[in-house]
Image (cartoon, rainbow, N blue to C red):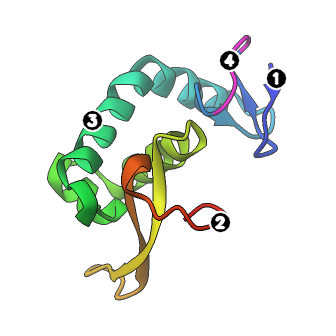
Amino acid sequence: MRAHAAGGYSSPGAIFPYAAGFKGSADTGREAAEAINKKLGRLQRLVHGAVKGRGRYGLTAEEAAGILNMDRVSVQPRLSELKAMGLVKDSGQRRINPSSRKRAVVWVLAEFAPQKGGDV
């Protein structure tokens, strides 16, 4: 078990963002992380494809979830992983999520992100 940047742990030999992590010593967290790691590459590819398909317009996690017919809670971590890999970036734009009425990050491929300092 290895510590990763978020303070949790990942499967032996794997580290975030290349593998899902878990916190604490509960077997359930470890089992959940191991189960998602079997699909991680596929889910990352699906989410990356959704972002790519929107071009410069980008999308929010909720929009990606709708396109992919997945739960937002499955999509958001994949966006975080893709961000850590440098494949997607925060566009600096925000859109209102219909479900929460809160502002949400609009993600774009790194090639479409503004080039002015920081993460945007």
Image quadrant in which the N terminus is located: top right
Binning the other alpha carbons within 10 Å of mark 3 as few (below 14), some (14 to 19) or many (20 upward) gives some
Q: Please tell me whether residue 85 belongs to the stretch shown in magenta.
A: no
Q: Residue at x 36, y 60 (%)?
A: 61
Q: What are the residue bounds of the magenta stretch?
A: 12-16
User: Which amino acid does the dot numbered 3 rest on?
Assistant: Leu
Residue pointed to by mark 1: 2
**Secondary structure at numbered mark 3:** helix
Q: CA distance from mark 4 to mark 3?
A: 21 Å
Q: Residue at x 58, y 31 (%)?
A: 20
Q: CA distance from mark 4 to mark 1?
A: 7 Å
Q: Residue at x 32, y 30 (%)?
A: 45
Residue pointed to by mark 2: 117
Residue pointed to by mark 4: 14
User: Which amino acid does the dot numbered 4 rest on?
Assistant: Ala
User: Which amino acid does the dot numbered 1 rest on?
Assistant: Arg
* Residue 24: % across, % down: 80, 38
Mark 3 or 1: in front is 3
Q: CA distance from mark 3 to mark 2?
A: 28 Å
* Residue 93: % across, % down: 41, 77
Q: CA distance from mark 3 to mark 1?
A: 27 Å
Q: Earlier in the sequence, mark 4 or mark 3?
A: 4
Q: Earlier in the sequence, mark 2 or mark 1?
A: 1
Residue sitting farthest toward the front: 115
Q: Nearer the viewer, residue 15 or 57?
A: 57
Residue pointed to by mark 3: 46
User: Which amino acid does the dot numbered 2 rest on?
Assistant: Gly
